[in-house]
Amino acid sequence: MTNTKNGTKSTKVLPYVPKYKSLTFKVKETVLTSQPSSIPINLASEKEKFIRTGLAPHFEVKDQKKLTEIANKAKNQIRFNLLAESEHILELVRDKYGDADNYLEHAYGPRITTEEATPMLLEYIEENALSESLKIHWCDNLACSAKMVWRGPLVNANRPERRKYSLWISSSDENNYLRESGIRCLMDHEIGTHFFRMFNDGFQPWFSHRSKFGLRNLGSFENMCNEEGLASINTVLRGRAKFLWGAAFTYYTACKSVELSFKDLFDHLGRYTSNIDYRWKQVMRVKRGLVNPNDLGGLGNDQCYFEGAVSILQNVDNIDFHLLMSGKVCIDELDRIKRVVRKDFVKLPKFMQNITAYKNTLKKICTLNGLNKVFPIREPPSIYMKLLSQKKSLCKKKVKKKCKCW
């Protein structure tokens, strides 16, 4: 059965596990027949060529002009103010575990198959009473570890009861969380954070009128930092070791992209992980915004995971997390909504039922990662500032007026 609206093709329904026969919930295997316009359409062949020959990839995208526009947006420029913190975490993990695969196995357990992970997904769905709320699909060609999406009436016709939610999970080796305990950590990220905030948001008065309540749009930089930062923290909650390694690695990769070509960056990241698939994925995500992926620079949009996590961990005592989970709102918007929020509709994941214990865990994560210390802010490399200047000049020449992207 093919779904033309979301570009998926269902190929197989995984068998029920006896313990969960009472659930009507099904987990399916799905193949994406279309990818986001920002993802190269020749990804698999270029990856194979690069790993085999070491030659820099040449990505083909559906709309290069649109991708260039995305790359030129201010919120997607690379930032360096947390470079010292990200490198500190990477070095902590390297000193203690050596290769990151050793850390990941210690923190999240050994790798497992989708058949082994499916009962864990069913258990998560059952304990959070979500069997009627969403569907889960395994997908072997997803460009990220997992992705939460919803379909239903348009925003201006708010009908939360008619929304359908789906979670796609990568079944490939690039998914670092397809592990014995890592799969639950990934669920805390995708369902425990993204789904619950998305679900709660649909019942709030601001859902259809964000501007009326003085709230930022969902695609704003601040919203992305809050959303992905909270999700990154929740990812490590159940980890045996709670280092923000993944978010720090992503932030660091973007910073180093301004000094290194595709191949050099790929090789440099070998200092922290020998995992070829994971290094490829991270370098590809940073360099895909360049017309020539071998050029210096890249996209900084994924840095919001680390930026948001650091900001939250350094302000735990000042945040009302119950209110933060009430919808898609930023921390600095909580005072604005606290008198109108519909608290009776707010659902919380199991791991946040005890907010006091949750906040205490966050404080320990902050200390473990050294984020209670003050690190020097590193200035952007001069070569990057030169690249920005060249981009700005080129943009001005093309539009013959001041570029709105800078």
Image: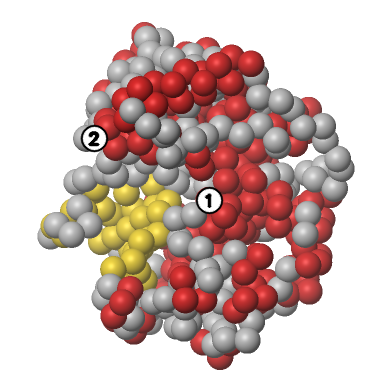
Name the spot of residue 6 as percent of width and height, x first. 22, 57
Relative depth, front residue between 231 and 139? 231
* Amino acid under disc 1: Phe
- Measured along the vertical axis of the image, is residue 38 above or below residue 224? above
Classify the position of the N terminus by image quarter: bottom left
Q: Earlier in the sequence, mark 2 or mark 1?
A: 2
Residue drawn 54% across the image and 64% down it: 193
Name the spot of residue 18 as percent of width and height, x first. 39, 72
Residue drawn 65% across the image and 55% down it: 233
Horizontal side, residue 64 vs residue 336: left or right: left
| Residue position marked by numbered label 2 in the rendering | 63
- Measured along the vertical axis of the image, is residue 365 above or below residue 165? above
Q: Is residue 96 visible?
A: no
Residue 221 is tagged as 1
Circle 2 sits in a helix, a strand or a loop, which is it? loop
Residue drawn 44% across the image and 55% down it: 219
* Mark 1 residue crowding within 10 angstroms, few (<14) / some (14–19) / many (20+): some
- Measured along the vertical axis of the image, is residue 140 above or below residue 165? above
* Mark 2 residue crowding within 10 angstroms, few (<14) / some (14–19) / many (20+): few
- As drawn, the residue found furthest toward the right would be 373
- As drawn, the residue found furthest toward the front would be 401
* Amino acid under disc 2: Asp
Q: CA distance from mark 2 to mark 1?
A: 23 Å
Q: How many marks?
A: 2
Q: Please identify the quarter of the rendering in which residue 338 is found.
A: bottom right
Q: Is residue 144 visible?
A: yes
- Measured along the vertical axis of the image, is residue 125 above or below residue 140? below
Name the spot of residue 285 as percent of width and height, x first. 44, 33
Circle 1 sits in a helix, a strand or a loop, which is it? helix
Horizontal side, residue 274 vs residue 92: left or right: left
